[in-house]
Amino acid sequence: MSVAIYPGSFDPMTNGHLSIIKSGLVVFDKLIVAVLRNPRKEALFTVEERVEMITEELQGAGNLEVDSFDGLLVDYCKRKNARVVLRGLRAVADFEYELQMANMNRHLNTQVETVFLMANDAYFYVSSNIVKEAARLGGDVDRLVPPGIARRMKAKLAATKGT
Ligand code: ADP
């Protein structure tokens, strides 16, 4: 059985992530969406909220597990018995960073392969950061994230403004 891990921050999950997940489910027998616990990155949503949001959006989507992890990705792959890391590619800007990560992971563990998929071209320029930035300034991001996530973002941004 081919098991792939799709790691990332997903703060929050966008339609770009969703498009990669849906393609991943076609290519692999099982997909594990893994939210990285990264204390160095300031996030809008907690890891638990992100896991919950992804789980909600992808209910019934196929053989999918939503989880979180910290430490080295290759160690997490070993724990999960997964040989494949799935990453998404957007515009050329992603390429260099993704190449570095894939090479580092191969250096750390030659058993793990990184596979790249392209998102639907409608979401080529969509990133969690740009979506958050636009939403913070009152922009309409409804077509860039799933409806449930758009609602959660509005509520979260309203709550953080009040603090
Ligand atoms: P990170 O926190 O590692 O920058 P993200 O959580 O933003 O990563 O994304 C996880 C993965 O999904 C990365 O491989 C990223 O390139 C990919 N990705 C994010 N948004 C899109 C998109 N709109 N189209 C294709 N791939 C995407």
Image (cartoon, rainbow, N blue to C red):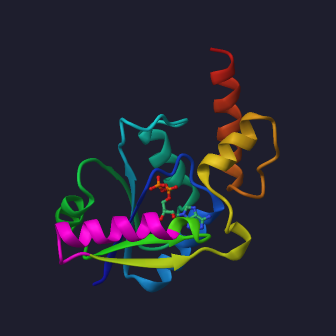
Left or right: 129 as drawn, with respect to 8: right
Q: Is residue 136 magenta?
A: no
Residue span colored magenta: 95-112
* Percent coordinates x, y for residue 6 in the rendering: 41, 65
Residue 60 appears in the rendering = no
Quadrant for the N terminus in the image:
bottom left
Against 43, residue 77 (above or below) is: below
Residue 154 appears in the rendering = yes
Residue displayed at 37% across by 75% down: 30
Against 38, residue 22 (above or below) is: below
Left or right: 115 as drawn, with respect to 110: right
* Percent coordinates x, y for residue 41 in the rendering: 43, 38
**97 or 83: nearer the eye?**
97
Q: Quadrant of residue 83?
A: bottom left
Outermost residue on the top side: it is 163
Residue displayed at 67% across by 30% down: 157
Q: Quadrant of residue 34?
A: bottom left
* Percent coordinates x, y for residue 153 in the rendering: 66, 39
* Percent coordinates x, y for residue 5 in the rendering: 35, 68
Main SS, magenta residues: helix
